[in-house]
Amino acid sequence: MIYLLATRIFGWLALLCRPTAAKNAEILILRHEVAVLRRQVPAPKPSWPDRALLAALARLLPRALHGLRIVTPRTLLAWHQRLVNKKWTQPPSPGRPPVSEEVRSLIIRLGTENPRWGFRRVHGELRRLGHTISSATVRRILRAAGLNPARRRQTASKEWAAFIKAQTSGLLATDFFHIDTVGLHRLYALFVMEVRTRTVHILGVTAHPTAAWATQQARQLLWQLGSPAAHFTHLIRDRDAKFTATFDAVFASENITVTKIPPWSPNCNPHAERFIRSVREECINRVLIFDRGHADKILRDYARHFNGHRPHQSRNQLAPLDDTNVKPSPTARIERREAVTGLINEYHRAA
């Protein structure tokens, strides 16, 4: 600032030796140059020394010329108010504790190594690893790192949503989905989900699904469930021709009422449809299926991951088989384990 003032003062002293006509001509030229520059630069950004010098010289000008300057009196007052606010700024309130660099790095690591995961999926993994953090913070950190958020899911109609919520404790949901092999042969997989815990049972995979085959898989499911099958009261299914009266009778023998959704209404069976979307995006759309045996192995491996590790929003980011009374403690070392032939990463606390 002292150097700037010294150069300006010597420059003004040199002006005293110049004739008045030359000064007036220079002033006219400078005014025209300023007018040209204003057309090209509508909002100039002077530096701090420029502001100080303009503020000091503006006091020597007549009031009528204030409006012709590069800055207006309102700008000078704004600069002064900014200095006042900066001097008397109060310290910010503590608010929420900041996210540690360790957790931030872990969030970015999970998002980078798993590009198909959204922020809620990453939030569930953090919960399993013992880190308490909100899903909104996870989403903000992922967005700041340039990672895309999760896509929105479709919701069921209000009537069916109310029914499913009221019957969740004893509700089963079933459906078919298809798989295309390398040789362009189509296979069909049948599954049943326990809606309350989100536990999935892969009943079987076949190239020729028939009513008899579906009925046999239903009998096998009830035999595997054993006595816990008595806790279920309803089964939701669509109107597929493979679900016959014999299929319904198998569940009726265990006092399970079969409820059919309306025609062309997959959103009325939202839990089954959501599982189909998950298994497609995370598993079968990312690997080439060779034959029925390969498809059966891949789907059962994914079901083990889905039931034993994958977090679910409706269960407070717990996996279906997790104990709700156990709260993991965070640790500095996190190990990655590959599941489903390396398609999915699972993270665990190191021993």
Image: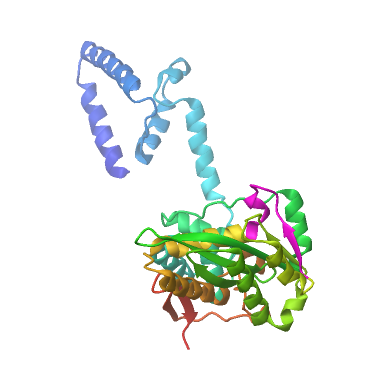
Q: Is residue 51 above or below residue 268?
A: above
Q: Nearer the viewer, residue 53 or 101?
A: 101
Q: Nearer the viewer, residue 32 or 324?
A: 324
Extreme residue in the bottom direction: 351
> Residue 236 at x, y = what percent?
70, 61
Q: Which residues are magenta?
A: 256-271
Q: Is residue 161 above or below residue 309?
A: above
- State which quarter of the image contains the N terminus: top left
Residue 11, quarter of picture: top left
Q: Nearer the viewer, residue 14 or 317?
A: 317
**Is residue 134 toward the left or the right of residue 75 in the image?**
right
Q: Is residue 301 visible?
A: yes
**Is residue 147 toward the left or the right of residue 233 in the image?**
left
Residue 308, quarter of picture: bottom right
**Is residue 142 toward the left or the right of residue 160 in the image?**
left
Image color mode: rainbow
Q: Is residue 213 above or below residue 116?
A: below
Which residue is drawn at the image coordinates 42% and 26% (left, top)?
Answer: 71
Which residue is drawn at the image coordinates 46% and 61% (left, top)?
Answer: 179
> Residue 176 at x, y = what percent?
57, 61
Which residue is drawn at the image coordinates 52% and 48% (left, top)?
Answer: 86
